[in-house]
Image (spheres, rainbow, N blue to C red):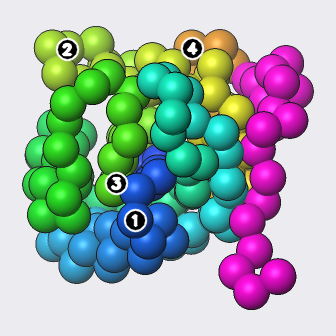
Amino acid sequence: MNDTPVLIALGSNLGERAGFLLQAVSQLSRLQGLRPELLSSLYETEPVGPAGQGPYLNAVLLAQTSLPARELLREMLQIESRLGRVRGERWGPRTIDLDLLDYAGQVIDEPGLRLPHPRLHQRPFVLAPLAEAAPGWRHPLLHKTARELLQGLDASGVRRWRVGY
C-alpha cells in the first residue's frame, strides 16, 4: 500500500450518535486501500445551521491510503448513504457526515473536490479533534497547526465527550 496520510472528519447529531461514528469508522477500516491509524476522542458540539437541531458528536480519523483522493471521497459518500445520510437542508441534521479534510497536504480545487477542506480553519468542532489526532499537521495554505488555528476561534461550545461519566 502506498502510504498517503489522510484526515477524515466524522460527525453525527441524529439517533445513536456515537454508534453512527463507530459504524463509519468500522466501514472505513474495511475499505481496500485504507488503513486507519488513530481516532481522536469524541467531542460534543453545538450545531451549525438550522435551529432546532440536537448537538453533534465529532471526531477526526487519521489514516493511510493508497486510494486516489476522488476515489476515497466516493467511498466516503457511499458509507454515508449506507448509514442513512439523507442530503436535504444545508447543514441540517444527519446520521453521519464524513468530510475529507486533508490528503497528504495537497491543495486541490476541482469540481466536487476541494482540499484542504475549505472551511476547516473556521470550525472549532473540526479543529479540536484534529489538534488531538494530528498535532503536527499544518494547514497547507495557512501554514498554521490545528491548535494555532483553534486558538483564534471561540471554542467554548466544544467539549470532550465521555461515555459513562
Badge 2 amino acid: Glu
19 to 158, vertically: above or below: below
In the image, is 40 to the left or to the right of 62? right
In the picture of the structure, the residue carrying the numbered disc 1 is 15
Residue 64: image quadrant is: bottom left
In the picture of the structure, the residue carrying the numbered disc 3 is 96
Badge 3 amino acid: Ile
In the image, is 61 to the left or to the right of 35? right
The residues bearing labels 1 and 3 have C-alpha atoms spaced at a distance of 10 Å
Of the numbered discs 2 and 1, the one sitting upstream in the chain is 1
Of the numbered discs 2 and 3, the one sitting upstream in the chain is 3
Q: Verify CB contact (< 8 Å) between mark 4 and mark 3.
A: no
* Circle nearer the viewer, 4 or 3: 3
Of the numbered discs 4 and 1, the one sitting upstream in the chain is 1
In magenta, the rendered stretch is: 144-165
The residues bearing labels 2 and 3 have C-alpha atoms spaced at a distance of 24 Å
Residue 123 visible? The answer is: yes
The residues bearing labels 4 and 1 have C-alpha atoms spaced at a distance of 36 Å
- Where's residue 76, x and y in %? 22, 52
The residues bearing labels 4 and 3 have C-alpha atoms spaced at a distance of 28 Å
Task: Out of 117 and 95, give the one closest to the viewer.
Answer: 95
